[in-house]
Image (spheres, rainbow, N blue to C red):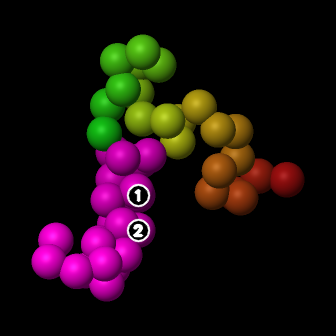
Amino acid sequence: YTSETQRRQAFPEWLHHYNHHRFHTAISGPPATRVPNLSGQYT
């Protein structure tokens, strides 16, 4: 990145990818799959 602003703008997309799509071998899937009711669909 050429500025702090560019880095800050890119961070949310990177974080979403890291937590929801990137496979983590230690937990056999993305971290978000380990959080119960992350989407708030269930009460």
Kindly state the secondary structure of the residue where label 1 is placed: helix
The residue drawn where x is 44% and y is 46% is 19
Instruction: Residue 8: say if magenta.
Output: yes
Tell me whether the residue at label 1 lies in contact with that at label 2, contact meaning CB atoms closer than 8 angstroms.
yes
Give the quarter of the image for residue 6: bottom left
Q: State the predominant SS element of the stretch in magenta.
A: helix
Quarter location, residue 39 = bottom right
Q: Residues within 10 Å of mark 1 (few under 14, many from 20)?
A: few
Locate residue 17, reporting x and y percent. Answer: 33, 53
Q: Which residues are magenta?
A: 1-21
Judging depth in this view, the residue of 30 and 39 nearest the camera is 30
Alpha carbon separation for disc pair 1 and 2: 6 Å
Q: Residue 36: x percent and y percent?
A: 70, 39
Up-down relation of residue 4 to residue 18 (above or below)? below
The residue labelled by disc 1 is 16
Q: Which residue has dot 2 on it?
A: 12
Q: Which mark is residue 29?
A: none
